[in-house]
């Protein structure tokens, strides 16, 4: 039981490049989330999903796209990376809604130069 | 607006001292939950506690205790006899928008000095 895993752990991109972050969970959770963490700003929700095939915008969705084709996977895409997207990205999952605790992945440190 | 405020950005205490981390929240919901998470230097976020707004009794778990007061919209976290392993960033969180997601405070960085 690996919980929530994220791939890759580190990545450096040049401005304008694209990439996809993969999140996988093996707990059969319905809800999945992508956050970014920046110094002094806590965690901010980028996008989330309430079930397979669904996605919704969070607080800071601009510049990101997501897909949830399989229940256990939640992908975060950056189509044209910008330096402002330099951050640590966390994926999380939960069994039900915001009433239940979220389980977090180890994070992906992304640097855009 | 529904939000969480953690006014203490950084706190440093000497080992074995008690320390309280403050969390003040705003919500228009009559029923809600509050959460605390810990982020140690290794980076992962760890769930600590969830409290229901119906239950205002203090919660104690070992050296950790939580004081929930609806009258002041606060959900404070106290560590008794702090240890170096308690050094971490601590986040308070509140469900928002139909309870589909959490909003997090900006976190309090706690440093325990040996």
Image (spheres, coloured by chain):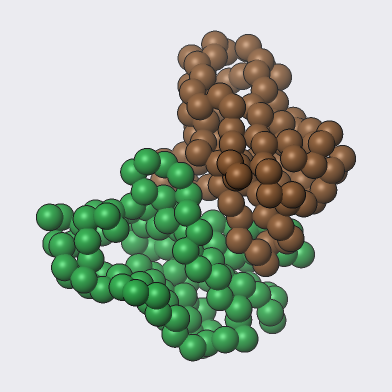
Chain colours: A brown, B green
Q: Is A94 situated left or right of B60 in this image?
A: right
Residue A44 position within the rendered picture, expressed as x and y whole percent measured from the top left: 58, 46
Residue A60 position within the rendered picture, expressed as x and y whole percent measured from the top left: 65, 41
Q: In this rendering, is residue B95 above or below A69?
A: below
Q: Nearer the viewer, residue A85 or A19?
A: A19
User: Residue drawn at (49%, 23%), measured in percent from left and top?
Assistant: A10
Q: Is B62 situated left or right of A93 in this image?
A: left
Question: Residue B84 sits in which quadrant?
Answer: bottom left
For the N terminus of chain B, the image quarter is: bottom right
Residue B68 seen by the camera:
yes
Residue A56 seen by the camera:
no
User: Residue drawn at (36%, 57%), measured in percent from left and top?
Assistant: B108
Give the number of callouts: 0
For the C terminus of chain B, the image quarter is: bottom left
Q: Nearer the viewer, residue B59 or A62?
A: B59
User: Residue drawn at (55%, 70%), measured in percent from left and top?
Assistant: B50
User: Residue drawn at (35%, 68%), measured in percent from left and top?
Assistant: B21
Residue B95 position within the rendered picture, expressed as x and y whole percent measured from the top left: 65, 64
Q: In this rendering, is residue A12 above or below A108?
A: above
Question: Residue A14 sits in which quadrant?
Answer: top right
Q: Nearer the viewer, residue A94 or A43?
A: A94
Residue furthest front as drawn: A1
Q: Is A33 situated left or right of A84 in this image?
A: right
Q: In this rendering, is residue B21 above or below A93?
A: below
Q: Is B108 situated left or right of A57 in this image?
A: left
Residue A31 position within the rendered picture, expressed as x and y whole percent measured from the top left: 74, 51
């Amino acid at each position: 039981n690996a919980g929530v895993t994220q791939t890759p752990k580190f990545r450096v991109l040049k401005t304008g490049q694209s990439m996809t972050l993969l999140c996988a969970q093996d707990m059969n959770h319905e809800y999945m989330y992508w956050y970014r963490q920046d110094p002094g700003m806590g965690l901010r929700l980028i996008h989330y999903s309430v079930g397979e095939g669904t996605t919704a915008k969070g607080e800071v969705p601009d510049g990101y796209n997501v897909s949830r084709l399989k229940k256990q996977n939640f992908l975060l895409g950056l189509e044209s990376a910008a330096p402002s997207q330099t951050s640590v990205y966390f994926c999380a999952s939960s069994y039900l809604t915001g009433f239940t605790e979220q389980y977090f992945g180890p994070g992906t440190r992304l640097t855009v130069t | 607006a529904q939000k969480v405020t953690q006014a203490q950005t950084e706190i440093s205490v000497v080992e074995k001292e008690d320390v309280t981390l403050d969390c003040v929240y705003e919500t228009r919901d009559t029923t809600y939950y509050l959460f605390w998470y810990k982020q140690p230097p290794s980076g992962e976020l760890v769930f600590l506690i969830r409290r229901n707004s119906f239950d205002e009794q203090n919660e104690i778990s070992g050296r950790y205790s939580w004081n929930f007061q609806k009258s002041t919209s606060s959900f404070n976290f106290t560590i008794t006899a702090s240890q170096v392993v308690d050094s971490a960033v601590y986040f308070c969180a509140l469900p928002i928008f139909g309870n589909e997601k959490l909003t997090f405070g900006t976190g309090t960085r706690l440093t325990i000095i040996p």
